[in-house]
C-alpha cells in the first residue's frame, strides 16, 4: 500500500511529491499524459525544448525562485527586460514601462492624471476586503475614466474572461498589478523543462515514484485504504492529493458529499488554446503584445526570442498566438493548419514582416481548464485543501487566489498541500 498518491504530474503535483519525499515519505505521482508538466509541459524539436504554453516568471515569484535554487538551477535562471506593446485601432503602442502607458497619445491630460493616481494607489495598497465585492470593470472605469478603461483594461478583462468579465472582482486585478515586475525570468537552455525534470529526478532519488501514461478511472475514498482504479493497475493508499481540476476530482473520487462539492462544481472555466510557430526570422522587436480590439482572432502575441536568445533554439524564433476560450468555441475543432489560416487575418495586420514562408514548423495545443473564472466575493468560494473526506486533499489551480494562476503559484500550492498532509 502506498503512503501518498498524487493525481497529476504538473508543477503542483510534482512539488507536493518533492516536499513529502524530503520528509521521508514515498509519494507516488500518477500522470495521465505521457509527458509531465501539465500547463507548464513542453515539447522537443530539433534538440531543444520549449513550453507548449508561453511562460515566464517575475522577480516577486519567490516560491519558484527558491525551488529553482534548491534544485541547483539558479545559474540558468535569467531575468531580462523586454519590450511590450498593445495593438489598438490598427496600431502598435509601446507599453513597456508605466511612463510609456501614461504617455500614450490616445489619452487626454486628465486621463493621464487619473491613470497615474489609480495605478499608484493599487500598486502601493495592501488587500482590502471591500475589493472582493467591487467589480474590477466598474471600479476601473470610475477611477481611470471610461476612455482609459475602454482602451486599456476592459479589453484585457473581456479577452480573458469573456461574458463573465463584469463580475471579476477588483481583488483579482489588484493582485495582478501588485506582484508583477518589469524584469521577466526564464531558465536558459530548456526553460521550464529543467524544473520538471529536476523535480522528477529528486523525487525518485528520495524513494518516490513518478508514473506517466496512467489514467485514473475511479477513486473509492469511502473507506480506508483509498482505492484507485487506473488503465494500468490498481493502487491502494493511505492518503490522496488530487491536483486535477475540481470538476474532474469530484467526478473521479467517490465519497464527496454534494453539499461540499456543489459550490465548487458551479465554477466556470475557459480553456487555453495556443498556436506555436517556429520561424526562420523574427517578425517583431516586442516580446509581448496584447490585442485590445475584441474582434481579433487571438488575445496575445508572444515573440519568445525577444526575451530568450534565439541561439537556444538553433537560431529559430518561437512565436505564440494565445487564447482563452469557452470549450464550445469553434476554434477548438480546427487542426493546426486551419487554426493558422484563421489567425493569419490578424497576424498580417499586427506583424507586417510576417510571411508564411518563414514557418519551419507549427504546433497547436489545448489546455483544458486553463483559466478558472473568478466572480465577486470569490475568496469565500475557494475550496480548502483539506476536505471532509478523511485523508483526501485538493490542490487545483482554481484554489489559487487572489493571484492569477501561474507557475509560481502552482509551486506554492504544491508546498501548501504537502504541509497540510504532513500536519495530519
Image: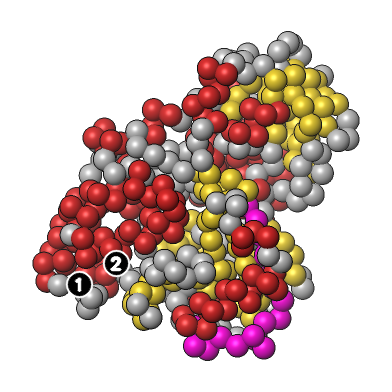
Which quarter shows the N terminus?
A: top right
Residue 153, image x, y percentages: 32, 60
Which residue lies at the image location 28% right of the left edge and 63% below the top edge? 150
Q: Quadrant of residue 310?
A: bottom right
Residue 337, image x, y percentages: 70, 73
In this rendering, the answer to whether 261 lies above or below 6 is above
Residue 241, image x, y percentages: 65, 28
Q: Which residue is mark 2?
A: 151
Distance CA(mark 2)–CA(mark 1):
9 Å
Q: Where are the magenta residues, as a range?
A: 351-367
Q: Residues within 10 Å of mark 2 (few under 14, many from 20)?
A: some
Q: Which residue is mark 1?
A: 107
User: Which secondary structure lies at badge 2?
Assistant: helix
Q: Contact, CB < 8 Å: mark 2 with mark 1?
A: yes
Residue 100 visible in rendering:
yes
Which residue lies at the image location 82% right of the left edge and 44% below the top edge? 213
Amino acid at each position: 500500500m502506498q503512503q501518498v498518491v498524487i493525481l497529476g504530474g504538473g508543477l503542483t503535483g510534482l512539488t507536493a511529491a518533492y516536499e513529502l519525499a524530503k520528509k521521508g515519505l514515498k509519494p507516488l505521482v500518477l500522470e495521465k499524459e505521457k509527458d509531465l508538466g501539465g500547463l507548464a509541459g513542453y515539447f522537443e524539436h530539433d534538440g531543444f525544448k520549449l513550453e507548449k504554453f508561453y511562460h515566464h516568471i517575475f522577480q516577486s515569484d519567490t516560491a519558484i525562485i527558491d525551488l529553482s535554487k534548491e534544485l541547483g538551477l539558479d545559474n540558468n535562471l535569467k531575468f531580462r527586460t523586454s519590450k511590450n506593446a498593445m495593438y489598438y485601432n490598427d496600431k502598435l503602442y509601446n507599453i513597456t514601462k508605466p511612463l510609456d502607458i501614461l504617455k500614450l497619445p490616445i489619452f487626454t491630460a486628465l486621463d493621464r492624471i487619473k491613470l497615474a493616481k489609480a495605478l499608484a494607489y493599487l500598486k502601493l495598497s495592501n488587500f482590502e476586503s471591500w475589493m472582493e465585492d467591487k467589480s474590477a470593470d466598474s471600479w476601473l472605469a470610475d477611477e481611470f475614466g471610461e476612455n482609459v478603461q475602454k482602451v486599456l483594461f476592459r479589453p484585457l478583462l473581456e479577452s480573458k474572461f469573456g461574458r463573465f468579465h463584469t463580475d471579476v472582482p477588483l481583488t483579482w486585478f489588484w493582485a495582478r498589478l501588485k506582484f508583477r515586475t518589469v524584469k521577466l525570468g526564464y531558465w536558459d537552455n530548456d526553460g521550464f523543462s529543467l524544473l520538471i525534470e529536476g523535480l522528477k529526478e529528486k523525487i525518485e532519488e528520495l524513494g518516490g515514484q513518478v508514473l506517466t501514461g496512467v489514467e485514473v478511472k475511479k477513486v473509492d475514498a469511502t473507506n480506508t485504504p483509498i482505492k484507485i482504479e487506473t488503465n494500468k493497475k490498481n493502487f491502494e493508499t493511505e492518503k490522496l492529493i488530487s491536483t486535477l481540476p475540481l470538476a474532474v476530482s469530484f467526478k473521479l473520487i467517490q465519497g464527496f458529499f454534494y453539499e461540499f462539492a456543489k459550490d465548487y462544481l458551479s465554477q466556470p472555466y475557459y480553456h487555453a488554446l495556443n498556436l506555436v510557430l517556429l520561424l526562420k526570422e523574427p517578425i517583431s522587436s516586442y516580446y509581448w503584445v496584447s490585442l485590445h480590439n475584441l474582434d481579433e482572432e487571438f488575445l496575445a502575441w508572444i515573440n519568445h526570442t525577444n526575451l530568450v536568445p534565439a541561439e537556444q533554439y538553433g537560431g529559430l524564433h518561437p512565436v505564440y498566438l494565445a487564447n482563452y476560450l469557452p470549450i464550445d468555441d469553434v476554434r477548438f475543432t480546427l487542426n493546426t493548419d486551419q487554426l493558422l489560416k484563421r489567425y493569419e487575418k490578424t497576424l498580417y495586420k499586427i506583424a507586417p514582416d510576417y510571411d508564411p514562408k518563414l514557418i519551419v514548423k507549427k504546433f497547436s495545443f489545448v489546455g483544458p481548464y486553463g483559466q478558472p473564472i473568478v466572480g465577486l466575493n470569490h475568496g469565500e468560494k475557494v475550496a480548502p485543501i483539506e476536505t471532509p473526506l478523511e485523508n483526501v486533499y485538493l490542490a487545483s489551480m482554481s484554489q489559487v487566489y487572489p493571484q492569477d494562476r501561474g507557475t509560481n503559484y502552482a509551486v506554492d500550492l504544491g508546498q501548501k498541500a504537502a504541509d497540510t498532509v504532513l500536519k495530519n
